[in-house]
Image (cartoon, rainbow, N blue to C red):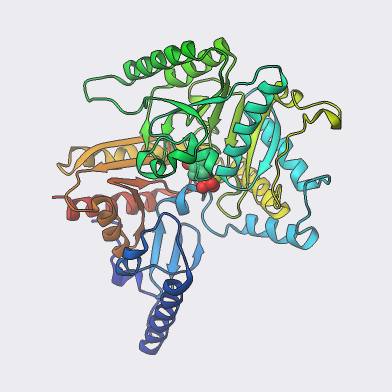
Amino acid sequence: MTGMRTTNAARGDVTDVTDTANRRARTQALVAKDAAHVWHPFTQHSRWLGDDPLVVDRAEGMYFWDTDGNRYLDGVSSLWVNVHGHAHPKIVEAVTSQLQRLDHTTFLGLTHEPGIELAQRLAELAPSGLNRVFYAGDGSSAVEAAIKMAYQAHAQNGGVRPLIVHVAEGYHGDTLGAVSVGGIELFHQTYRSIMLETRQVGSPGVRSAEQSAQARAAEVLQELRDLMAAHVDQVCAIIIEPMVQGAGGMLTHDASFVQGIRAICDDTGAYMIADEVATGIGRTAKMWAVDHAGVSPDLLTLGKGVTAGMLPLSAVLATEEIYEAFLGSPASARTFFHGHSYTANPPAAAAALANLDLMATDNTLANAQDVADQLARNLAPLADHPGVMEIRRIGTMTGIEVHPVTERTGFDVCQWARRHGVWVRPLGDVVILMPPLAIQPAEVDTLTATVTAAVDAVVR
Ligand SMILES: *Cc1c(COP(=O)(O)O)cnc(C)c1O
């Protein structure tokens, strides 16, 4: 298998025996401290140590290295955030010089150049009509802000609309508002009794093999129209992940679904919130996933890739109409009462600006389309593998659904790939591939060859 990397080859830079022993001792000491004190996200700690924790030491380009000196190809962009590879010198330089000039101040009652320049850049790049930029810290906090904006804008325009409508299998983050509009039973049912009041429709991405994507989109849109008719003037917003429900397992849907949401929002006055935290900034090989459908939402959330995966930053893009609903005298209480300690953190904003500069000069969107085409070509044979149920993909966002043959089949496939120098992380029995947008053809070949071999080894 060309391009395959064995664990031994990946250890190529470990030469000296003492060196190896020292590295091993350091790893073991770190893992022991981790086990004593750290609580990891989305992690069952009764299994953590048994799964041989990987301690990351450093990263460069498409790779990172563990403390034992093993090298791994970053096949999921460090959980869907990385764009140009790790430690890109231009972004490192932008962040470093920003830190030296202005590290951080509040954005409450103050403003600064990186925050201003980034807002202008995002407004220029945004789908039409989205001219206002409100910063937050993570994708979840952007979703919280968007929900509050939608509710408050309606209330201040004379209509209190307490309901938010969302989609089964949707994922919008882990804070409570975001969980309230989530539709993944495993993640969200635990917190059901402390959630906001919402209504859910079926997932446009879940359908039988006989049903077309268009037919499924039409079916869910009809369900939505019926729901809206039953709750006239009660729904302040409909939130969707346009084109693909990422955490739901890369469930792709037809563009007519996104267009239909726009039409229903126009008819009912509900705001359309497009959660582009995962899909935005080129991940689907267009700047925004809504570009595939040719529509503009009223509110758009972005995060993950905006800083190219270097620092936490997110934002809500809003229309002027929504923004204007918040204008009034200080006594009118029409202010948007929301903000975070690190809102518009200057080095994060500088990283985002450097990212957007690089995307323009390096033609990153075109590269992402090449990556997408190569993923499609390389993975086509795997679709016929008896262990594979379905491969779903839009742009570089790829899900390979495997047949469950062990308790954690997806995980076992990823562990096999890890032992062969490729890091990927599953969602249940869906193995996710989402390489950095700037990845090059030889590395894509390594990624797909290793994952293909992993599926072959684990699912038979
Ligand atoms: C990851 C994600 C979020 C949450 O972002 P965090 O930065 O993890 O809080 C929200 N929405 C979507 C669609 C996501 O994929």
Residue 94 placement, left or right of 207: right
Q: Where is 235 relative to 67, above or below?
A: above
Residue 203, image quadrant: top left
Residue, x 53% and y 17% (percent of image)? 262
Residue 116 placement, left or right of 66: right
Q: Where is 57 relative to 278, above or below?
A: below
Residue 276 visible (yes or no): yes
Nearer to the camera, 388 or 320: 320
In the displayed orientation, state which residue is furthest to the bottom.
18
Residue, x 31% and y 64% (percent of image)? 47
In the displayed orientation, state which residue is furthest to the front.
193
Residue 25 placement, left or right of 383: right
Nearer to the camera, 327 or 90: 327
Residue 132 placement, left or right of 2: right
Residue 249 visible (yes or no): no
Q: Position of residue 22 (x, y in %)?
A: 42, 86
Q: Where is 220 relative to 57, above or below?
A: above
Q: Position of residue 373 (x, y in %)?
A: 38, 36
Nearer to the camera, 447 or 66: 66
Residue, x 53% and y 50% (percent of image)? 84
Q: Position of residue 266 (x, y in %)?
A: 57, 13
Residue, x 58% and y 47% (percent of image)? 138
